[in-house]
Image (cartoon, rainbow, N blue to C red):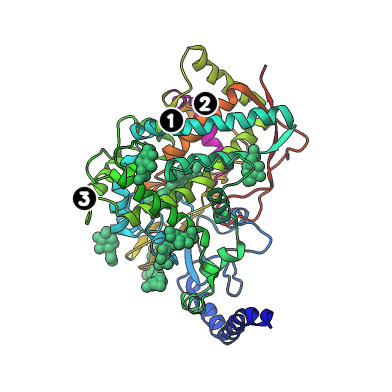
Amino acid sequence: MSIFSTLWPSVGILGSIGLSILIMIPFVYFYSQYKFNYWKRKGVKGPPTLPFIGNFLIPGRPIPLMQMDHLREYGKFFGMYQGRRPILSISDPAIIKRILVKDFNKFHNRMPTNDSNITASQNLVSARYDKWKRIRSILTPMFTTSKLRKMEGLMVQCVDSLYDVMGRLAKTESSFLVHNVMGNFTMDVISKCAFATDTNAHDENENTFVRNARKLFEFNFIRALGRFLVPIWMKNILKAFHVKYFLTPELDFFINISFELIKQRKQNSTVKYNDMLELMIKAKHGNDQLMEEEDRFDSHHVNVGNEEQQQEQKLLSEIIGSKYLSEEEIVAQSVIFFAAGYETTASTLTFALYELAMNPDMQNRLYDEVMAVVNNGDPLDYDHVMKLSYLDAFIAETLRLHSPVLMLNRQVNDTYHIPEYNYTMEKDECVIIPIYAIHHNPEFHPDPERFDPERFMPENRDKMIPYSYLPFGGGPRNCIGMRFAMSEAKLGLTRLIKDFIFFKSPKTCDELKIKSSFVLLKTTPILVGVKRRN
Ligand code: HEM
Ligand SMILES: *[C@@H]1O[C@H](CO)[C@@H](O)[C@H](O)[C@H]1NC(C)=O
Ligand SMILES: *[C@@H]1O[C@H](CO)[C@@H](O)[C@H](O)[C@H]1NC(C)=O
Ligand SMILES: *[C@@H]1O[C@H](CO)[C@@H](O)[C@H](O)[C@H]1NC(C)=O
Ligand SMILES: *[C@@H]1O[C@H](CO)[C@@H](O)[C@H](O)[C@H]1NC(C)=O
Ligand SMILES: *[C@@H]1O[C@H](CO)[C@@H](O)[C@H](O)[C@H]1NC(C)=O
Ligand SMILES: *[C@@H]1O[C@H](CO)[C@@H](O)[C@H](O)[C@H]1NC(C)=O
Ligand SMILES: *[C@@H]1O[C@H](CO)[C@@H](O)[C@H](O)[C@H]1NC(C)=O
């Protein structure tokens, strides 16, 4: 009896869902077929479609590889369908530059998402124009060189833990799962800097914070698919039936923690923390510079020239609304910093360690570069590691060959003509820019599958076609955390390179195999060997 009474409600819900899905299928099918005429009507070529899914996903072919196939087959301009939504795919650097930079005033939004939690949806990634502009202009000064120097102390504590873990692994293990260790490191850094929480993620005994964080990032294919395959009206029906499928309790956990922390901080305003939370609470529009002279050094390889900088300054100097962030807005940013900063940086470091192991000569050259600083009596701190040019080129090449983020997207807010293809976008049409495929296109990057940091050395950098290298996106809406991620990666890597050797062990794969990847690049597990230098 008790079993039935607990079973009944869920069976009831499942039954209703099943019934509504059955009833809806013909309508949805008809609708989707109609939608799949869009590109044909507009005279744009593109890959064949599967019912419902469209063609952004092919069973058995990971998205990055499929995008490379498409670029070869359909060129730099073609139409796709993500679910029922038509999307233009553009890989032509000249057009990309116009979309990201010159015509930013028409392309300031990403594709709309429908976040179930209103608090969380105010984050920088999802926010739309005026709101985005206001939040971005208040946050931008937080990521300047002088603010990052203040956060360096927090990062170094996490590098110390990473160093200890590596020491233990070098003693006991012949090879280790790189992503675990690097993921624990970036989780430590971002939770310290954005949530003021010591996670000790390396520890075996996971605390609640770490457990929730890991769950938040567990890749759930069905849920990801559901996000944009299920029409909004059907989501609303599911919500009405209290199906919590699209809501994540883990997210609530983070939102809860953030509110609590802000309350504590406001009661205790004299204590100095030097973390993002403090900066956000105190941030006021117009109080700090948007860009410092020194920042230029760190952004050379991501298409940031004078033109871009002036445009950004002008754009962000005037805003509508409050000069401060509300509590809700601060919470939303903490959560998005976590989401955008944890896995991306962990992947970057994982791929970097793989390339170190596969290229011992490069590893030696990096070692020499690091030792030049040490032998000079200088510390491996922010100022010194950011100036190492081979390290910089090495990471840049890692981000080219193994770009963690697979694509960018934008939505146009007006009609927009693309003369190269005599094509006019309609208002609200969306574009994607397939970063991974662009980075692997021989036309832009000769011998694209070869790992070669020389491409990014100062003397070669100018040969690269602008906007054919986009690991952090581009224009005013590029990755706000770029300099943060770079300093985190460089502080971590220099310390490891100084005292450890990473090598190819029998368990290290000769070639990385790409697994089904959705938003971020995923490969089969990467193991490398580690030993201490003598
Ligand atoms: C190696 C690590 C990282 C990579 C490869 C990366 C990549 C990207 C990319 C490709 C975008 C989209 C840019 C565009 O649409 O033009 C982006 C946006 C963003 N990233 Fe990162 N990211 C990294 C680390 C971080 C970190 C550490 C943070 C936070 C501290 C962060 C916060 C953000 C935010 C908030 C946005 C949205 C910006 C906006 O819409 O104004 N990212 N990132
Ligand atoms: C998202 O959902 C809200 C309320 O549920 C609705 O008002 C809004 O129109 C939706 N946005 C889009 C882009 O469909
Ligand atoms: C790091 O995190 C993983 C889970 O991702 C865990 O299994 C592992 O024990 C942690 N510590 C180390 C040193 O890898
Ligand atoms: C979002 O999550 C927070 C934290 O759990 C909750 O207090 C709030 O009511 C949620 N908002 C919506 C609109 O679901
Ligand atoms: C959030 O906090 C409230 C009160 O502080 C608590 O009742 C609730 O269970 C918390 N929710 C989560 C998901 O931790
Ligand atoms: C204020 O800060 C002190 C020192 O960090 C701490 O002991 C105290 O609990 C804090 N008070 C509140 C209300 O958070
Ligand atoms: C698109 O956005 C720009 C910048 O905010 C604005 O000036 C323009 O009026 C918008 N266009 C439309 C059709 O809404
Ligand atoms: C461009 O397209 C328009 C209508 O879509 C057509 O009338 C015109 O002839 C085309 N121009 C060229 C040069 O193909």
Marking on residue 318: 3
Front residue of 449 and 498: 498
Question: Label 2, on which residue?
Answer: 390
- Residue 532, compared with residue 143, is above or below; it is above
User: Who comes first in sequence, dot 2 or dot 3?
Assistant: 3
The verdict on label 2 being within 8 Å of ligand 1 is: no
Residue 464 image position (x, y, % from top left)? 47, 37
User: Who comes first in sequence, dot 1 or dot 2?
Assistant: 1
Say what secondary structure mark 1 lies in: helix
Say what secondary structure mark 3 lies in: loop
Q: Residue 368: say if magenta.
A: no
The verdict on label 3 being within 8 Å of ligand 7 is: no
Determine which quarter of the picture holds residue 142.
Answer: top left
Marking on residue 302: none
Q: Residue at x 58, y 51 (%)?
A: 211
Determine which quarter of the picture holds residue 163.
Answer: top right
Front residue of 301 and 374: 374
